[in-house]
Structure formats: structure tokens, C-alpha cells
Amino acid sequence: MKRFLQAMLVVMFLFMLIGCSDKNSEETEDQDEEEVNISGHWTGAIHLPGQPLHIALTIDGADEGDMSIPMQGIEGANSLPVDTLKIEEDKVTITVNLQGSILSLEGAVEEGEFKGDFTQNGQTFPFTLYEREETEGEFLSVETAIGTLNGELELPEGDGPFPVMIIIPGSGPTDRNGNTAMGDNDGLKQIAEQLATEGIASLRYDKRGAGKNKEAVGEEVDINFTQFTDDAQAWVELLTEDERFTSVGIIGHSQGSLEGMVTAQSNDVDVFISLAGIGRGMDEVLYEQLQAQLPEGLLEESEEILQQLKQGKAVAEISPELQAIFRPSVQPFLISMMQLNPTEELEKLTIPVMLVNGERDIQVPATDAEILHEAKPDTELLILENMNHVLKDTTEDIQDNYLTYSNPTLPVADGLMDGMIQFLKENNFIEE
């Protein structure tokens, strides 16, 4: 549902070399050899007009690697091999051959960033890539009717026991760190790491179809909203029985907010925090998002489809342009989610609740948090002026906003962690 320039594909890589003259010492040559070791993983975006395009590059050796463009299905086994890699003093040039079209990245590396120009078919746009170090902690697993689910446990220092928060990511194939095909932002990973510094453990997991849970999926037509709340409940039950933990809370982001809201009605959940959660029916939110992106004819068709789905009726005839959103196989999930009213689900909770959103959120406006708060006034409401949907501070500029979606080096928004920690202390989830 986001607009990307379809003609643009990408390649990438990161690195910088300072040339040595024959007069350099052996020690300097050794240092330079270390600097040209570009093996590793890089992620970022090409700054296309309107909305950046997320790309990722993995380098396995001095001249071997592959490039991914998740939004265009170019990833995993379909990734594009690096064609050429050239280093001249402080300039790096990488090319990839995509069905006869040459894509090139040319730029320099400085302090973990590879910045320069991307060129394809005579068109040039800036790009920025960031060096990634993939580290993993302890993993737990739960068995479900549709395969094993894995989740990463972030533990504080010390012996414990600790309170633990289950972090539920948003819609689609979102991974446990909060990353999607739109980019790697690591927002949920950063939250988990900062909770640990406050003595709070956390369990975060990839949505089905993403990361370590990529294979834990059935047929799309069989997916419904209850499946995701069942997943969250399975984690609640596992952690409740684990003697390392004293109490269990939930943090739900975006669609994960509604999933967490329903799951938190369990007697085993002690606190609930909603991050950028919807306050209206999914049909209203989806229509609002489509308004800014579809021409009048397709928007009218979308409205009619949404009305039918809201009534629990499948729609057989869908225009080709709308198949990605309303294809028949995804309609059962949309129907199941549209039957839930977030304010009604929130009102069922008898535990402490915090509602958080940002005024720079272009996917779920801050007014949704206010709607939820109005429905249940005893909730804690936190609206952060500069925070967007991926929980990062940004400006009013739409391009700046989207660029945060693919920048994992940015910290979470100012005031977010302080607000959540204070809420947890005030409600005795952790000690003052």
C-alpha cells in the first residue's frame, strides 16, 4: 500500500580504502588491509522521490556478495549477485546486472555508513547504507498447530527473577526487531535492550512468515486474527510457568497492539502497553490509508469492498490494481480483524494500561490513541510530538519520515522509554 518507483531496482555495498604508496610501512599496509575487509551485512535505502526503497547487501568476501530488494521480492534465494566491485582510493563502485540493466552504487564509507549515488538507466539518486552486526541471544520456542514459533529472550544482568514483557510486532511479515520490507529500523530490538538495563526481561518474536518463524505458516486463506492472539497467548503461558520471571506484561506495536489487547484479557497478564495501536475498526483505518494513494474510481471500489468485508461477506470480483490488498486469499483475515472494535476490547481490561503514539505517525495517527483513552479514561496516555510509526523521532518532511524506516542507527524517540519505565514503576511492575 506504499508507493515505490517500480522501475527502480537497486544494489548496494559499503566500504572504503585508503591507498598505500610504496613508501608506506608494513604496519600501515596491515592497517589498510583491515580497512578493506568489507565482509558483512549492510542495510539502508535508495532515496527515491516520495518514498525511499529499502535495499540490503551481504558481502561474503573481498569481491563476492549479493543484494536484496525486499519490496520487489528480490531476497533470499532470489537475491542478486554482485557483478563487479571496484575500489579506487576513497571511492567504492559496485555493479549488479538485473536482466541486462546495470545498477551501480558509487560512494565512500565513513564511520559505518556507505553513502553515494545509485544509478540505473541514466537516472541517479542518493543512497545510504549502514553496517549491521547481527547478534542473537537466547531463544525459546512454543509448539502450535501450525509449526514451532521461536522468540528471542533479552535478559538483564544478574540472577533474577525478573519481570518480563512480551513484545508483539506489527502486521505482515514483521520480524522481532520491528523490521519489514520497508526497511530495518530495529525499534523493537532497541526497546528490548533498554528494558534490560532497567531490570526487565523481554521476549520478542518474528511474525509468522518472517525471520526464524518464516516457515511456520499455512495457507494464506486459512489465516485469521485469532491465530495471532493464540500465538501471543502461547508465549504468555510459557513465561508464566518459567521460574525466572515474576510477572508478565505485553507491549503491542501497530497491529500487535490489538493482538496484545485481546491477549491481555488473560488473567496471567499484569500490564499492557499499546504502541501506535489503532483506535477504530480496521475498515476505517484501511480506507483512510487508501484515500491518499488511490484514484477516485479505485477508492470507490475499495470502499464497497470494505463495506462487504465488514459485514463478513467475501468479494469475488477485484480490480487487478487492488489484488495486492483485497485478493480473495487474504479476505478471511481482513474479515476476522474487522469484527473487532479496539475500544470495546480495551474496555474489557482491568489491568494498568498505557497508550502511546506519535504526532509524526503517518500510518496510525495519534488521534487513535486519544480515541482509546476517551473510551477508557483510567489509561495512561503518552503522545510524543516527533515520534513516527516506527518509534523514531523525525521531522514534518515526509521523505525524512520514511528514511527512518530503514535506519537502524537511530535511537527510539525521546521520551518513549522514560515514559514506559515510569508507567511500569508506578504500577509496581518494577520497583522504584
Image (cartoon, rainbow, N blue to C red):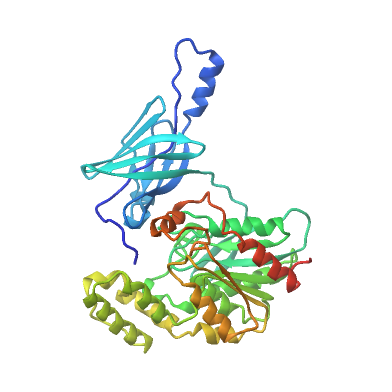
Q: Nearer the viewer, residue 122 or 25?
A: 122
Q: Is residue 313 left or right of residue 379?
A: left
Question: How many numbered circles does the render carry?
Answer: 0
The image shows residue 347, relative to residue 157, as above or below, that is below
Which percent across, then down, holds residue 173? 44, 63
Q: Is residue 213 left or right of residue 193?
A: left
Query: In this view of the protein, can residue 139 be seen by the observer?
Result: no
The image shows residue 154, relative to residue 323, as above or below, that is above
Quarter holding the N terminus?
bottom left
* Corner quadrant of residue 384: bottom right
What residue is at 29 percent from the left and 79 percent from the top?
A: 302
The image shows residue 361, relative to residue 408, as above or below, that is below
Residue that protrudes farthest toward the bottom in the picture = 311
Which percent across, then down, holds residue 231? 54, 72
Query: In this view of the protein, can residue 75 be seen by the observer?
Result: yes
Q: Is residue 209 left or right of residue 196?
A: left
Residue that protrudes farthest toward the top in the picture = 23
Quarter holding the C terminus?
bottom right
What residue is at 38 percent from the left and 71 percent from the top?
A: 219
* Corner quadrant of residue 237: bottom right
Which percent across, then down, holds residue 405? 45, 56
Q: Nearer the viewer, residue 11 or 312?
A: 11
Which percent across, then down, holds residue 324? 30, 69
Q: Is residue 264 left or right of residue 404?
A: right
